[in-house]
Amino acid sequence: MLSAQVTATSWHKSSRSNGNGGNNCVEVAVVDSAVGVRDSKNPDGPVLRFSPAAWESFVTDTKLGVFDVTN
């Protein structure tokens, strides 16, 4: 289970979490076989688990603007 592999110091908050006092953000933890993502306001809540390949694809697509919302 991912939560058993992750310590409190393993979680990293997004560098873009400065808006609204940094309260509306996610934290990410990387372990050997998975990447965990959780809501920083609820550290004891659920953790989304991704394969390293899926996470890398998501980050790449985000940087390319694939998920940008246009009006």
Image (cartoon, grey):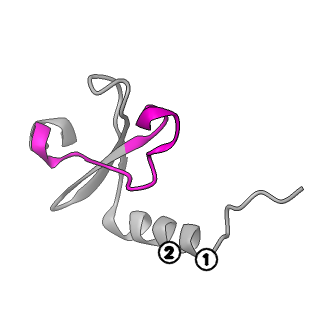
Query: Which residue carries the number 2 mark?
Result: 60
- The quadrant of the rendering that contains the C terminus is bottom right
Please provide percent x and percent y for residue 36: 30, 47
Q: Residue at x 33, y 23 (%)?
A: 45
Q: Amino acid at mark 2?
A: Thr
Q: Amino acid at mark 1?
A: Leu
Q: Quadrant of residue 5?
A: top left
- The quadrant of the rendering that contains the N terminus is top left
Instruction: Describe residue 36's horizontal placement relative to residue 4 as left or right.
Output: right
Do residues under tags 2 and 1 come within 8 Å of each other at their CB atoms?
yes
Up-down relation of residue 51 to residue 56 (above or below): above
Label 2: state its secondary structure: helix
> Which residues are drawn in magenta?
7-26
Q: Residue at x 67, y 61 (%)?
A: 67
Q: Residue at x 38, y 56 (%)?
A: 15
Please provide percent x and percent y for residue 6: 13, 43
Question: Within 10 Å of the Cα at label 2, are there few (<14), some (14-19), or many (20+) other Cα atoms?
Answer: few
Q: Quadrant of residue 47?
A: top left
Along the line of sight, which residue is nearer the eye, 65 or 22? 22
